[in-house]
């Protein structure tokens, strides 16, 4: 059975804070003991908007930074779901990502 990564998303006056759910952190520690996980990532509203205007959704990159895993490793264990830290409602599910932008190359640069 694939176990997906759950990321809690908090919002405040300046932006978003992303944290791995404790059960997710434990699961990743068992499966990837050498992964260098971050405790949290904070991104301002302006930074998120500017990044996404050029590169598309930021969520894949946040997952890689939080977990210390490659995106292929993340997909191999079921992807990730970003949920509101208060309501637990899903905000973004990497398993339902739109197809890549054909105008962008592999690294998000114009082809």
Image (tube, helix red, strand yellow):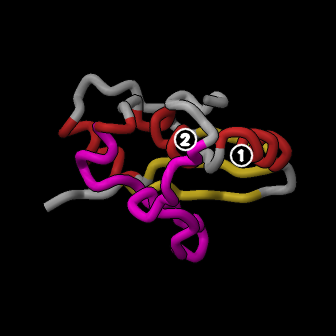
**Can you give x and y, in whole percent of width and height, for residue 102 in the image?**
57, 44
Q: Where, by quadrant of the figure, is residue 81 drawn?
A: bottom left
Please name the residue that numbered disc 2 is placed on: 62
**Can you give x and y, in whole percent of width and height, for residue 37 in the image?**
42, 31
Residue under the image location 49 percent in, 55 percent down: 99
Q: Which mark is residue 52?
A: 1
Residue under the image location 32 percent in, 27 percent down: 35
Query: Start and end of the magenta stretch?
Result: 73-102
**Can you give x and y, in whole percent of width and height, for residue 103 in the image?**
63, 40
Of pointers 1 and 2, the one earlier in the residue sequence: 1
Residue 23 visible to an observer of this rendering: no
Q: Where, by quadrant of the figure, is residue 73 drawn?
A: top left
| 33 horizontally vs 47: left or right | left
Image quadrant containing the N terminus: bottom left
The stretch drawn in magenta includes residue 58: no
**Can you give x and y, in whole percent of width and height, for residue 8 in the image?**
53, 58
Residue under the image location 39 percent in, 60 percent down: 95
Image quadrant containing the C terminus: top right
């Amino acid at each position: 059975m694939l176990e997906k990564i759950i990321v809690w998303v908090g919002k405040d006056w300046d932006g978003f804070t992303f944290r791995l759910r404790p059960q997710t952190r434990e699961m990743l520690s068992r499966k990837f003991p050498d992964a260098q996980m971050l405790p949290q990532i904070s991104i301002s509203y302006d930074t998120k908007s500017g990044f996404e205007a050029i590169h598309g959704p930021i969520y894949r990159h946040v997952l890689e930074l939080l977990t210390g895993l490659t995106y292929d490793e993340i997909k191999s264990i079921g992807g990730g779901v970003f949920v509101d830290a208060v309501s637990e409602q899903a905000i973004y599910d990497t398993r339902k990502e739109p197809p890549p932008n054909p105008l962008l190359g592999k690294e998000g640069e114009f082809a």
